[in-house]
Image (cartoon, grey):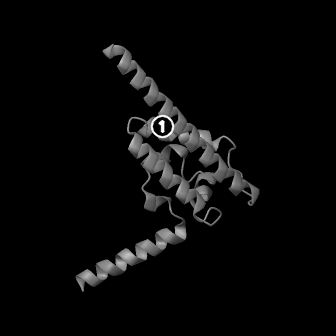
Amino acid sequence: EHLAMCASVAQSAQKVLSSRRERVRELLQEELEKFLKCSDCSVDPGLADIIEEALFTALGQHPHRYSAQARSLLFNLRNGAGAPGSLLRRLESRELLPTDLPGLAAEDMAPEEHREERKAKRLKAMDACTA
């Protein structure tokens, strides 16, 4: 009886994980399709699957980290999608590879303009501390 219950719990967990992965793929695909419709971008049509697989490979054993990184990726794909230095543009130019994304900090996913603003603020704060 205990083994049957354990098997049932494992099956339920697998269904939840499979459902979560499918939802992440769908959301990634939606964002990529929006970008392709309004841009001259040449992103691989299978990129959503490649990104999700990279996420799962790196973080699948840690469901909370997987979900948090997926949310961060989706936010940054939406944020300044066509802007120079955006996450999508960096993927398109191969400056970043899908396998880089699971370990990328949210700050490093931001568009170039945002990264530069944050860097300037940090330098200003450091200068204020040492003055």
Q: Residue at x 65, y 46 (%)?
A: 29
Give 88 or 21, whichever is nearer the viewer. Answer: 21
- Left or right position of 75 against 46: left
| 76 versus 28 height, above or below | below
Quadrant of the snapshot with the C terminus: bottom left
| 104 versus 58 height, above or below | below
Give 1 or 87, whichever is nearer the viewer. Answer: 1
Q: Residue at x 65, y 63 (%)?
A: 82
Q: Residue at x 61, y 66 (%)?
A: 84
Residue lying farthest to the front in this orientation: 1
Q: Residue at x 59, y 42 (%)?
A: 25
Residue flagged by tag 1: what amino acid is it?
Answer: Phe
| 57 versus 80 height, above or below | above
Q: Residues within 10 Å of mark 1 (few under 14, many from 20)?
A: some
Q: Position of residue 9 (x, y in %)?
A: 39, 25
**SS category of the residue bearing label 1:** helix
Q: Position of residue 33 (x, y in %)?
A: 70, 51
- Left or right position of 67 against 43: left
Quarter residue 83 falls in: bottom right
Q: Position of residue 59 (x, y in %)?
A: 42, 40
Give 80 or 85, whichever is nearer the viewer. Answer: 80
Q: Position of residue 1 (x, y in %)?
A: 33, 13
Badge 1 is on which residue? 56
In this rendering, the count of numbered labels is 1
